[in-house]
Image (cartoon, helix red, strand yellow):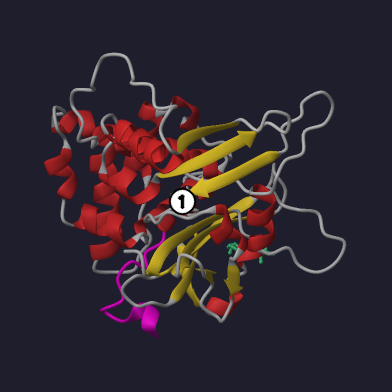
Amino acid sequence: SQQNSKNAQGLVGLRNLGNTCFMNSILQCLSNTHDLRDYCLRNCHRGDLGGNCRAKAALMEEFAKLTQTLWTSASNEAISPSDFKTQIQKYAPRFMGYNQQDAQEFLRFLLDGLHNEVNRVTVRPRGPAEDLDHLPDDEKGKRMWSRYIEREDSKVVDLFVGQLKSSLTCNECGFCSTVFDPFWDLSLPIPKKSSGEVSLIDCIRLFTKEDVLDGDEKPVCVCFLFRLIVMINCVFLTLFDLLQLKWADSGGNSVFLSAANAVYSLYAVSNHSGTTLGGHYTAYCRNPALGEWYSYNDSRVSPMSSSQVRSSDAYVLFYELATSSRM
Ligand SMILES: *[C@@H]1O[C@H](CO)[C@@H](O)[C@H](O)[C@H]1NC(C)=O
Ligand SMILES: *[C@@H]1O[C@H](CO)[C@@H](O)[C@H](O)[C@H]1NC(C)=O
């Protein structure tokens, strides 16, 4: 089978050390993130340590080592992520022990830890921030982003961080205040539907919908501009783009943004099944070398068809920019 063929790399399971399926699931999703995988395989992180010596980048070193083992091991025998676990719990003590944890929270801590170790910024700019409120929104957004990059700039930021714009217009005086915030992921609300399936687009629509505030608070307009709606690669999108979203489910699990002419495709899923207490995490990933989907259930890796990947039921979804006319 393909699974046993010599060329099929990245089809290596991770042993469960005791309720560590949440960690295994996220590690498999990240290890199938093409650019992050290559960054690790080529040891590029060692060139990005800045003022850190290698000992100070122990989490990144262990993550890179694990990724390298997943992608270069001669057999498809499952490996133990225990050295990696030792490092992540040094960075974030909440992951000590063997309790079930939340995969999204783990993802945030891990990306944050990796970023801190390979941040290209060694000296953060000082002094008061210039007031940008008089600038047009486009300009303000760009300046806010530059300001962020002057402090936080790494391969992890290149791949995973976007900018979220929210504006609030007062119904009475028409004044519109706008804020720009960097984001590492988006948590989408799930709308209640009386019939039919809830799609990812339903969730995005609800997320970007105008909020009507009750009571004495009068502002009624909340609109969003995304630097990116999903976790990887950047294009600027407007609320209009988002409303034009077309859900293309032609077996490819893609999101098509017609106005931006951009296609984002799903490449990894961390899935949770069962109850919050007794649940289990697995991952579904599209192997970047083979283009085929595989299911990762701790140490077991098995092929699956893309039509089995149901993005509307999944817990954490990873999308990458496939094509854009704005690139
Ligand atoms: C994962 O593997 C276990 C043990 O074989 C099995 O009971 C479970 O159903 C599998 N879960 C998924 C989602 O494949
Ligand atoms: C995730 O697991 C749930 C519950 O087992 C299942 O219904 C759903 O189809 C799975 N999602 C994906 C993306 O396969």
Quarter occupied by residue 19: top right
**130 in relation to 3, above or below:** above
Q: Residue at x 77, y 39 (%)?
A: 212
Residue type highlighted by circle 1: Ile
Q: Residue at x 33, y 43 (%)?
A: 157
x and y, in percent, of residue 142 in the image: 35, 40
Residue 306 against residue 94 in the figure, above or below: below
Percent x, y for residue 90? 36, 27
Q: Nearer the viewer, residue 148 or 121?
A: 148
* Ligand 1's quadrant: bottom right
Question: In this orientation, does residue 183 appear?
Answer: no
Mark 1: which secondary structure? helix
Left or right, 151 with respect to 309, comes to: left
Q: Residue furthest right?
A: 194
Asked whether, in this view, residue 275 is left or right of residue 229, the answer is right
Magenta region, residue range = 1-14
- In this view, the residue in front, 57 or 164, is 164
Q: Which residue is mark 1?
A: 26
